[in-house]
Image (cartoon, helix red, strand yellow):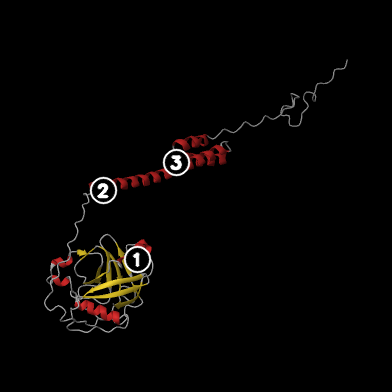
């Protein structure tokens, strides 16, 4: 009986790749064991949540080690870096936001404390009325209109100087504007030199086609100012003249000249750049106002005509301000004596 030979070559026959030829058995290589996971990669994820800066450090170190050694855990290291950097950013943003919120809250508390400690606001007492008119000696006997350094903004002749009449006591005129007519009553008995200048300019057409360039609307001053042909607030007729009522009711240098008095609604007064610098600019008071008694009152506005001024004031000031140009242009078309 023939026995089949055993599988493989006879004992002692070398095989290719057989390190043990004497066994007669073929050998097969074992798979290479897996590389260990880098410990710092795992630590970077854990520290990324608990202590982000340390997680960033471990993540970068682990990536360097993995590159050299071939250890596993590269994805873990990258995940650890992402978590760590995210936590760093969140922490920084939280600190900045918290600081800003704290600063805002502290400022708010300071304002509340300051407001609570502020003394109660008391109503401001009304200013005294203007002094009663007592005609000063020589009223209207020495009206002078000296030339100014600045030339006239529009051709104009100075009015006659010297003595001017105080009779009639009142002179009426009509100021026609693009918003309607405004009746004026000029107080010749109290301010003859001022009325003399105003009437002269009106008769020369100086006010014709000129703007009312300024509207003031605040708690203490409510006026419409006109009489400057340039519309800038700096124009004039090329001459000036002295103040009259109510300034002449006080001794020169009286401290009361710097204290406010009541200029009632409907007052017509001269604008100026200081005492005795009157020119052509004037204003209409459309609500009781506080001013020092250094603005010559030379008349009043007809009560019915004040409705026109009220309409102009109601439209407000350009830009919503309390002092400036009216929102819609106001033009004096003419001023004529009645």
Residue at 34% x, 47% y is: 104
Of badges 3 and 2, nearer the viewer stands 2
Q: Which is more toward the observer, 106 or 240?
A: 240
**Residue 15 versus residue 74 in the image, above or below:** above
The quadrant of the image that shows the N terminus is top right
Q: Residue 23 at what x, y percent from top left?
A: 74, 23
Seen as rendered, the residue at the extreme top is 1
Residue at 28% x, 75% y is: 173
What is the CA distance from the residue labelled 3 to the residue labelled 2?
45 Å
Residue of label 3:
53
Residue of label 2:
115
Q: State if disc 2 and disc 3 touch (CB < 8 Å).
A: no
Under tag 2, what secondary structure?
Answer: helix
The quadrant of the image that shows the C terminus is bottom left
Under tag 1, what secondary structure?
Answer: helix
Q: Which mark is residue 312?
A: 1
């Amino acid at each position: 009986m023939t026995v089949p030979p055993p599988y493989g070559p006879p004992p002692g026959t070398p095989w290719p790749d057989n390190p043990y030829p004497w066994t007669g058995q073929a050998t097969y290589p074992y798979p290479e064991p897996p590389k260990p996971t880098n410990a710092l990669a795992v630590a970077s994820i854990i520290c990324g949540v608990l202590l982000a800066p340390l997680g960033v450090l471990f993540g970068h170190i682990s990536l360097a080690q993995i590159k050299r050694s071939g250890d596993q855990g590269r994805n873990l290291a990258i995940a650890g870096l992402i978590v760590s950097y995210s936590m760093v950013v969140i922490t920084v943003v939280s600190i900045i936001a918290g600081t800003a919120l704290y600063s805002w809250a502290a400022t708010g508390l300071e304002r509340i404390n300051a407001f609570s400690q502020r003394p109660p606001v008391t109503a401001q007492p009304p200013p005294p009325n203007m002094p009663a008119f007592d005609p000063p000696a020589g009223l209207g006997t020495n009206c002078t209109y000296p030339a100014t350094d600045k030339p006239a903004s529009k051709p104009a002749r100075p009015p006659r100087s010297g003595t001017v009449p105080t009779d009639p006591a009142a002179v009426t005129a009509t100021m026609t504007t693009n918003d309607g007519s405004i009746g004026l009553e000029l107080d010749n008995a109290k301010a003859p030199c001022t009325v003399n200048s105003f009437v002269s300019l009106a008769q020369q057409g100086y006010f014709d086609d000129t703007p009312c360039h300024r509207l003031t609307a605040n708690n203490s001053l409510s006026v419409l100012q006109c009489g400057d042909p340039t519309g800038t607030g700096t124009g004039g007729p090329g001459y000036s003249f002295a103040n009259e009522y109510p300034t002449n009711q006080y001794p020169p240098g009286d401290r009361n000249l710097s204290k406010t008095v009541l200029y009632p609604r409907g007052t017509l007064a001269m604008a100026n750049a200081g005492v005795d610098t009157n020119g052509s600019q004037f204003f209409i008071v459309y609500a009781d106002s506080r001013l020092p008694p250094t603005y010559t009152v030379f008349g009043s506005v007809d009560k019915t005509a004040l409705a026109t001024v009220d309409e102009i004031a109601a439209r407000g000031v350009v830009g919503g301000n309390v002092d400036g140009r009216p929102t819609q242009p106001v033009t004096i078309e003419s001023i004529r004596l009645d």
